[in-house]
Image (cartoon, rainbow, N blue to C red):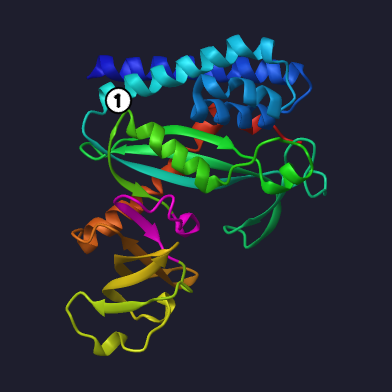
């Protein structure tokens, strides 16, 4: 086991070296580090077939990038292969996004370095920065969490301004990342927050947070009593408890197990609306799966290993 852990660390170091090699080429071509990291994400998701497209998207010399991006793709696959040798049991995949704040960035809609205005939920205001797609896996047999990646992505405004030739939403990229990970790990659960409610993602056993304004088609308590929930039209109208609820998802209706919980904090009482498509999960299992999402916060030091901390523009 110790040898396996050492192999994972070595593979991770090789991956970071490959990332930095690509970033060096990008910087020498006059582009920012964040542009390079966005290119890295495209290649990791798309494989070698995406190298030419990635080079064209960011206006870089394809020939110079070919070898470096090929080595990056190899290092990425090697890292996942070695990690899958260590994590043989079932895993939960955590997909989230966070903001890399750039408070002193120039006040344009989108700067040449990829910074733009983002609403920060932690601070409750719009701030300058760039959003990062953050992905990790949790080994359900040991509880250990491993960072898979944290990379900036382009917003639609960058496409409109001609800064990139291709645009994918974070939901589309999350779907692609999930498909890649399924080729290496036994994915039994996926954890998102409320911003990832989409028929492209809600296809397997997921644990999500719902927004309070989500409309309900039908709802009943797990105990089978209808009186306490009769007439409620939105998730936020429900009192604390456990329910079965029918919700619309794209063009279909799905039934979920919905957990409404009140949590007391220094700032007051907060209500969370957690749900799962796995109706067999207990209340404790739903909450435990949701708490896994916060493991990503402990892994943000890995973002620094990829060089984001010195990309202040």
Question: Which percent across, then down, holds residue 149?
Answer: 48, 33
Q: Which residues are magenta?
A: 193-210
Looking at the image, is 189 positioned above or below residue 64? below
Q: Quadrant of residue 250?
A: bottom left
Viewer can see residue 17:
no
Residue drawn at 82 percent across, 44 percent down: 106
Residue drawn at 34 percent across, 81 percent down: 239
Residue drawn at 62 percent across, 63 percent down: 124
Report if residue 201 lies within the magenta region.
yes
Q: Quadrant of residue 112?
A: top right
Callout 1: few (<14), some (14-19), or many (20+) C-alpha neighbours within 10 Å?
some
Q: Quadrant of the C terminus?
A: top right
Left or right of residue 9: residue 105 = right
Question: Which percent across, then down, holds residue 139?
Answer: 27, 36
Question: Which percent across, then down, holds residue 201?
Answer: 41, 50
Looking at the image, is 64 positioned above or below residue 51? above
Left or right of residue 296: residue 309 = right
Question: Which percent across, then down, holds residue 12?
Answer: 43, 20
Left or right of residue 170: residue 182 = left
Report if residue 253 lies within the magenta region.
no
Left or right of residue 232: residue 43 = right
Q: Which residue is mark 1?
A: 84
């Amino acid at each position: 086991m110790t040898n396996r852990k050492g192999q994972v660390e070595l593979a991770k170091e090789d991956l970071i070296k490959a990332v930095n090699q690509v970033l060096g080429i990008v910087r020498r071509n006059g582009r920012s580090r964040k542009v390079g990291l966005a290119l890295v994400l495209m290649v990791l998701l798309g494989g070698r077939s995406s190298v030419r497209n990635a080079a064209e998207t960011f206006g870089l010399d394809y020939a110079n990038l070919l070898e470096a991006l090929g080595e990056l793709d190899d290092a990425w696959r090697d890292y996942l292969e070695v990690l899958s040798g260590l994590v043989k049991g079932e895993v939960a995949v955590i997909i989230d996004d966070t903001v890399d704040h750039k408070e002193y960035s120039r006040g344009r809609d989108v700067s040449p370095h990829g910074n733009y205005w983002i609403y920060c939920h932690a601070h409750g205001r719009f701030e300058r920065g760039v959003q990062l797609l953050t992905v990790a896996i949790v080994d359900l047999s040991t509880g250990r969490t491993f960072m898979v990646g944290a990379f900036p992505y382009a917003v639609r405004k960058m496409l409109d301004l001609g800064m990139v030739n291709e645009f994918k939403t974070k939901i589309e990229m999350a779907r692609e990342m999930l498909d890649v990970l399924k080729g290496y790990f036994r994915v039994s659960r996926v954890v998102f927050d409320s911003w990832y409610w989409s028929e492209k993602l809600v296809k397997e056993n997921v644990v999500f947070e719902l927004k309070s304004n989500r409309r309900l088609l039908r709802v009943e308590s797990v105990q089978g009593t209808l009186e306490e929930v009769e007439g409620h039209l939105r998730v936020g109208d429900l009192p604390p408890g456990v329910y079965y609820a029918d919700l619309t998802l794209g063009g279909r209706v799905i039934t979920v197990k919905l957990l409404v919980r009140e949590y007391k904090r220094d700032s007051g009482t907060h209500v969370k609306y957690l749900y799962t498509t796995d109706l067999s999960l207990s209340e404790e299992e739903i909450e435990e799966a949701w708490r896994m999402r916060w493991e990503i916060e402990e892994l943000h030091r890995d973002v620094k290993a990829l060089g984001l901390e010195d990309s202040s523009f």
